[in-house]
Image (cartoon, rainbow, N blue to C red):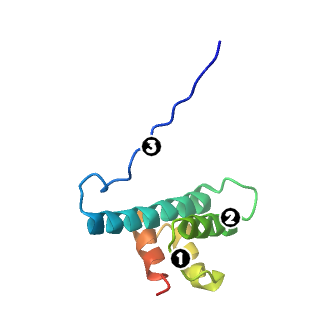
Amino acid sequence: MRVVVVRQQVPEAGLLQGGSHQAVDERATLTFWRAAVMLEECIVLRPFPAGNELYGYGVALAYLGMRGEQVNTKFEAWRELIADIRALKLDSYGIAERHRSLRVP
């Protein structure tokens, strides 16, 4: 028996509405939110025996870079953000906003 997997490409939210400027803004918003969720999950759920914060930081940076977003990559700039996530002071939307504040012009 042969199994064939077919992947259908689905456009990101906002791209179907037609407004290209709006689609770009929505795409950037989703990008920062997704990076925020990845960072938050690594810090809060602690899936690894050690280094969860550093791993989450690396994953978030890699994802943002892959999506073309330039952010401050120095760990010191992320230290307070990571401490706030660990203390459960921020939700994923707050983390995404802090990510956006680290944008490099």
Q: Quadrant of residue 27?
A: bottom left
- Compared with 20, 105 (above or below) is below
Q: Earlier in the sequence, mark 2 or mark 3?
A: 3
Please state if 57 lies on the left or on the right of 17 as rendered: right
Please state if 95 lies on the left or on the right of 80 as rendered: left
Q: Badge 3: few (under 14), some or many (20 or more) residues near its Cα, within 10 Å?
A: few
- Numbered mark located on residue 9 in the image: 3
Amino acid residing under circle 1 = Leu
Q: Which residue is mark 2?
A: 55
Could you tell me how far apart the alpha carbons at marks 2 and 1 are, in whole angstroms?
A: 14 Å
Residue at image x 51%, y 65%? 67
Where is residue 1 drawn, in percent x and y? 65, 12
Q: Badge 2: few (under 14), some or many (20 or more) residues near its Cα, within 10 Å?
A: some
Where is residue 26 drawn, in percent x and y? 33, 64
Q: Which residue is mark 1?
A: 81
Q: Nearer the viewer, mark 2 or mark 3?
A: 3
Amino acid residing under circle 2 = Tyr
